[in-house]
């Protein structure tokens, strides 16, 4: 029985805190074979994995660098969308042969879907031109 502030508490209803013993550090796993693999196994942290936010940031960073520094693999496919989209948004530009009425291979429906946000962004004031008086 424990008596605290005039209240008697039975032993089976008391809260007991145990001290945590520090965990023993694990030895790194050494792999048989070339020195490179053995050195790499010492550097590995057992049970480590990035958090979801860290993994997302790494993926975004990889995508950003891929967009900035990769070459356009098939420029014909890329510019066959940009040119007609520029024509829809700005009112001037080139019309590729796939969209011409003579061939009518592609439809403007996909481009109209993307031209609405592009048209809205075009209507925003330009920061450079609005700051100069």
Image (cartoon, grey):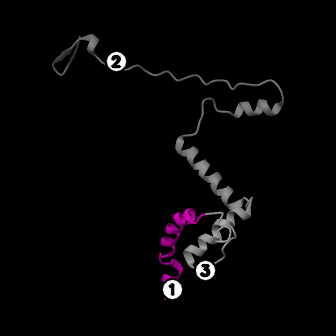
Task: Give the alpha-carbon distance from disc 3 to disc 2, as whole Å.
Answer: 79 Å
User: Badge 1: few (under 14), some or many (20 or more) residues near its Cα, within 10 Å?
Assistant: few
When asked about the image quadrant of residue 86, the answer is: bottom right
- Left/right of residue 110 with respect to residue 105 in the rendered view: left
Predominant SS along the magenta part: helix
Q: Are marks 3 and 2 in contact (CB under 8 Å)?
A: no
What is the secondary structure assignment of the residue under circle 3? loop
Which of pointers 3 and 2 lies earlier in the amino acid sequence? 2
Q: Residue furthest front?
A: 102
Range of magenta residues: 107-133
Task: Name the residue carrying label 1.
Answer: 132
What is the secondary structure assignment of the residue under circle 2? loop
Which of pointers 1 and 3 lies earlier in the amino acid sequence? 3
Taking depth in this image into account, of 5 and 122 the one nearest to the observer is: 122
In the image, residue 117 lies at what x, y percent?
Answer: 50, 67
What is the secondary structure assignment of the residue under circle 1? loop
Task: Give the alpha-carbon distance from disc 2 to disc 1, as whole Å.
Answer: 71 Å
Query: Is residue 116 depicted above or below 129 in this figure?
Result: above
Comparing labels 2 and 1, the label whose residue is closer to the camera: 1
Comparing labels 3 and 2, the label whose residue is closer to the camera: 3
Q: Residue furthest left?
A: 6
Task: Name the residue carrying label 3.
Answer: 92
Residue lying at 64% horizontally and 53% vertically, measured from the top left: 63
When asked about the image quadrant of residue 2, the answer is: top left
- Left/right of residue 58 with respect to residue 118 in the rendered view: right
Magenta-span inclusion, residue 21 = no
| Quarter the N terminus occupies | top left
Residue 16 badge? 2
User: Badge 2: few (under 14), some or many (20 or more) residues near its Cα, within 10 Å?
Assistant: few
Taking depth in this image into account, of 29 and 111 the one nearest to the observer is: 111
In the image, residue 58 lies at what x, y percent?
Answer: 61, 48
Magenta-span inclusion, residue 130 = yes
């Amino acid at each position: 029985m424990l008596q605290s502030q005039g209240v008697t508490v039975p032993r089976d209803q008391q809260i007991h805190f145990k001290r945590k013993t520090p965990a023993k550090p694990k030895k790194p796993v050494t792999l048989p074979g070339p020195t490179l693999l053995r050195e790499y196994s010492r550097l590995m942290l057992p049970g480590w994995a990035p958090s979801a936010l860290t993994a997302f940031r790494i993926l975004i960073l990889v995508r950003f660098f891929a967009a900035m520094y990769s070459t356009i693999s098939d420029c014909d496919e890329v510019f066959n969308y940009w040119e007609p989209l520029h024509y829809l948004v700005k009112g001037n530009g080139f019309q590729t042969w796939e969209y011409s009425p003579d061939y009518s291979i592609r439809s403007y429906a996909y481009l109209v879907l993307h031209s609405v946000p592009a048209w809205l962004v075009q209507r925003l004031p330009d920061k450079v031109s609005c700051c100069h008086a």
